[in-house]
Amino acid sequence: MIKKIFAFMLSLASMLGAEAQAQTKQFTLEDLNFGGVNYRKFVPENRWSTWWGDELVRLDAEYCSVVDKNTGKEKTLLTTDQLKKSGLDVHSLYSAKFPEDGKPIVILTSGSQAVAYNWKTRKTLWAVSIAPGSQASNFCYASRSLAYVKDWQLYVAQATTGNNAEPMSAARKLTSDGSREIVYGQSVHRDEFGIDRGLFWSPDGKKLAFYRMDQSMVTDYPQVDIPDPDVTPKSGSRIAKAAPDKYPMAGETSHKVTLGVYDMTTQKLVYLKAGDPTDRYFTNVAWSPDSKTIYMFELNRDQNDCRLVSYDATTGEKLRELYRETDDKYVEPQHPIVFLPWDNGKFVMQSQKDGYNHFYIFDTTGKQLKQITSGKWVVENFLGFDTKHKAIVYESNEISPIQKNIWIVDIATGKRALIDDNGEGWHNGTLSKSGQYIVDNYSTPTTPRNIAIVNTANGKRTRWLTAANPWKGYDVPEYRCGTIKAADGTTDLYYRMVMPTGFDPNKKYPTIVYVYGGPHAHNVDARWHYSSRSWETYMAQHGYLLFILDNRGSENRGKAFEQVTFRHLGDHEVEDQMKGVDFLKTLPYVDSTRLGVHGWSFGGFMTINLMTTHPGVFKCGVAGGPVIDWKWYEVMYGERYMDTPQTNPEGYAQSSLLPKAKNLKDRLEIIIGDNDATVVPQHALSFLKECIKYGTQPDFFVYPGEPHNMRGHQSVHLHERISRYFFDFLK
């Protein structure tokens, strides 16, 4: 009997030991970094979908299925095998589009063609050729036309009936002077002001609006392309090649942008008569529902005077100025106007003129009819309209600055209702055509991902996906969230802490402050693990505590919160981050003699700023792609927040890190991509020159051929290097 009990105890101990071992599996960077070979295994399951009118269609690599909105059950619509039998070489259905309600028609990309396919008859209705190596493209279903840019020139191609599209030689060439200096149909103003494209089809598909950017007057920044060692150049020369980038620096000459309109019917091309484009920004292009009028926001170079202007799309003539907004700091248009589906004479406009981004209703004479939303919270995303109830569906942080929830607001009454699945966490919604249904994809600090189908009219919710925790069985740290007061003594700032795995409150831990701190970004929200970066988990696994704070100047907290840094980038941000350091020093488990700091881009600027403004506080730091002096940053971003070097010399001098190079006393590594076209290498190299002059000793590492952020598996190498620096100097 004793022997049996002893054997049982051994067996139990063995089982418990195995279970304990299973619960403490360790992550590697190959698991946690997006460039890692195992990364996909550790991302919560997701589902991709699109709307076919009010029918929900699931998109997958090999099939599309319609989803029952009441049960979540799926029924297959079409498969890649079916398409191949019909003569279509389609490798994935993730990009499938369903343009007509109730009709079995899908738009597919098939090799060198875009096709319209009827899955009931199993026939291709029409096809249009896709230009290989195009620099930009935009397809219009209404006219079955493809606008694209190839070798800098703008073309329009129209679909032909059946499987075989006309060759690209049949496409209509609209321009002849395109070059790297005269750019057509692409994003302009360096992707600021919400701009992400340069081709805009009218609703009826008969007119194409497009950007033309003349950057011949912009100085070339001397980038260099270095060939891979194992590549044999076609030219026969092994010498690196000049690859200059048009980079308008703050205070210097910027490019000139105009907006053209091509009429497919008349084959005429006109340009909007907006006046001299010098030192002006044209953004947020929108068409009227009848395709006769174009609306765009026009902004002066100081970015403190913004106007909404309408133009005749046929003649290019200016019709009227509908709205003007000025500010003593800056105005920042980010969204085009959107017309009410039931009233072509009224549109929705977003503005933060009352201090927070909200919805307003205007008519086409420019009269403001009403403000739809208001309060000390921010509308973050317009999702669409509930056409039956004449309401707007949108995402906002009304519940909490670190949450994003889905709401509906009645345009007539202004009454709002929360309509997402749970009222917690961080939600991303996609709305059906009528606005009656929404797919709600969300997470919470403890929920990896849920997807629900919500009926916006009656509130019925159907859970479509409850993702399993992909980190189950691994040694996962504790993630905490809280607030501290900013340096002004009144403003709440949100922070995230990632505790070392196996945390013991009686021990003292080396602590890393991860920082960004700049505009149009934040680090802390109510997503899974409070939006913690996977690298933070990796470092927590190695015994480090991570602290992340969103200082004043970051996003989604209203205009005053964001604009406090105006003309003096880096001042209030550093003050707030040091309040975070003061908070850390009150925690008995933080070793204040072993503090580190790390950030990228604006965060790289903050890293060096913190280390040189407060030498001795941080034992070591890693600054990636750091801005060093804002006079070397681009016109659009830099001048918005700093004005020009000519008008704000004191602010630029105070924000510059060059004079602070002499203050560097602790271990600092600077890392850049050799071909960074965002924060050009001149920043880091100039700082190194100053360090040499003053006798201070930073470390420096370069990724040859890489841009502002490291791509692919090089990101794993990057984060191993960052980690090793802290392993070496923050033990």
Image (cartoon, helix red, strand yellow):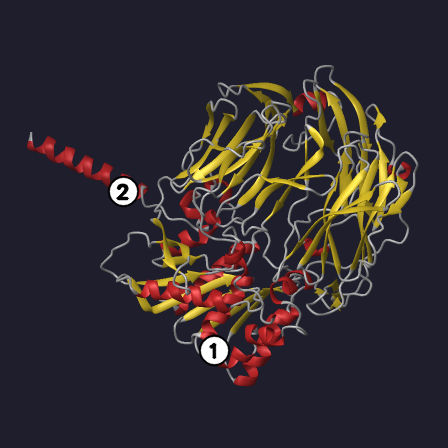
Q: Secondary structure at mark 2?
A: helix
Q: Secondary structure at mark 1?
A: loop
Q: Position of residue 256 (x, y in %)?
A: 79, 59
Q: Residue furthest top?
A: 121
As rendered, which of 416 and 418 lies closer to the eye? 416
Give the Cα distance between marks 1 and 2. Answer: 46 Å
- Residue 664 is tagged as 1
- Say if 574 sits above or below 292 in the image: below
Task: Identify the residue position indicated by label 2 in the image.
Answer: 20
Query: Is residue 18 in view?
Result: yes
* Res 241 quadrant in image: bottom right
- Say if 697 sits above or below 535 in the image: below
Q: Are marks 1 and 2 in contact (CB under 8 Å)?
A: no
Q: Position of residue 362 (x, y in %)?
A: 67, 40
Query: Is residue 45 in view?
Result: no
- Say if 220 sits above or below 383 in the image: below
Q: Position of residue 705 (x, y in %)?
A: 66, 61
As rendered, which of 192 and 561 lies closer to the eye? 561
Which one is earlier in the sequence, the residue at label 1 or at label 2? 2
Q: How many marks?
A: 2
